[in-house]
Amino acid sequence: MATQRKVIITCAVTGAIHTPSMSPHLPVTPEEIAEAAIAAAEAGAAILHLHARDPSTGRPTQDPAVFEKFLPRIKASTDAVINLTTGGSPHMTVEERMRPAIEFQPELASMNMGSMNFGLFPMLERFQAFEHEWEREHLENSRDLVFKNTFADIEKTMTLGALNGTRFECECYDIGHLYNLRNLVDRGVVGGRLFVQSVFGILGGIGPHAEDVMHMRRTADRLFGDGYAWSVLGAGSNQMRIAAQAAAMGGHVRVGLEDSLWLGPGRLAESNASQVRKVRELLEGLSLAVATADEAREILELKGGDRVGF
């Protein structure tokens, strides 16, 4: 009998795209982030992708002191793989963005595979009232923003991470990012089994059409063969639709309030765990098994939760 394929669920708990005024359910304080992450793991997420926010304003921060307020609690409460952002916010410097992943030496860290326009300003059409002034500026300023991830930036971050045994969730927002990753592999900057996270529906990157998903998968197959694990995230209303398509195509899935505030049309997700439960039902409806944290470690060839710096 063939071994049943296991699908990894990643939950991106808070991110840096959405702002607190958009949803009362978005985790902001360290306590909220910890509680949301633990609940998501209990619901079936094998990987927890974590950002931090200023607890007073909800503004994204890469201050390791803020991460330190929730990382030990999450580690003590769940065996989930902790994946720390190096994306931070497009408005931060690369040096700021690297700090948590370098200091805490996680099993996984995210790494964007190229510079790009990163347009968040269309959300101003849906959200008009903001509690904090930075929220409107955050969206408006994305009209004239390049999210900087040069080859030098990527190489520096991935080389420093590799010294600590950290592997990377390689976030690819467009086809060119896959070719960037191939170049990094060819030059020996990154090795071993790749974890490719394809991102659909961000203005400035590839769109969310089913043909876009297939194009991203075909290109990755051609460039990396069987040397990679493929996962997807769909922004906003694309979240579950793209998850279903990718799962049927042999991929893994990512959900969470970083990527979408919604559980259904016009219905805010009241928690990250609710999105994890929904995608789990979707996977099980496709007769697919959900990977445990240890199975995710095996699939992605990670160093283990006992070798992190927190």
Image (cartoon, rainbow, N blue to C red):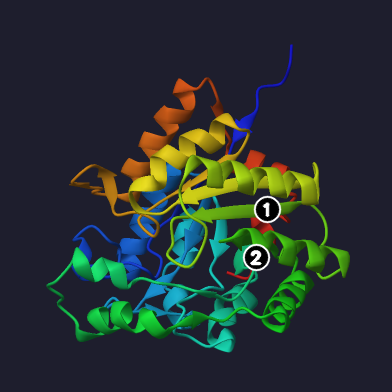
Residue 266 point in image, percent of width and height: 18, 46
Q: How far apart are marks 2 and 1 (CA)?
A: 19 Å
Q: What kind of residue is marked 1?
A: Phe
Image position of 10 with respect to 191: above or below: above
Image position of 54 with respect to 194: above or below: below
Q: Which picture quadrant has residue 159?
A: bottom right
Q: What kind of residue is marked 2?
A: Val
Image position of 153 with respect to 46: above or below: below
The dot on residue 195 is 1
Residue 135 point in image, percent of width and height: 25, 79
Mark 2 and mark 1 lie on one chain; the one further toward the N terminus is: 1
Task: Report helix, strand or loop for mark 2.
Answer: loop
Please state which of residues 85 and 232 is positioned toward the viewer in this rendering.
Answer: 232
Q: What is the number of callouts on the image?
A: 2
Picture quarter with the N terminus: top right
- Say if residue 107 shows up in the picture: no
Residue 132 point in image, percent of width and height: 19, 81
Residue displayed at 35% across by 43% down = 275
- Judge left or right: residue 150 versus residue 275: right
Mark 2 or mark 1, whichever is nearer to me? 1
Q: Sort mark 2 into few (<14), some (14-19) or many (20+) by Cα contacts within 10 Å.
A: some
Residue 8 point in image, percent of width and height: 57, 41
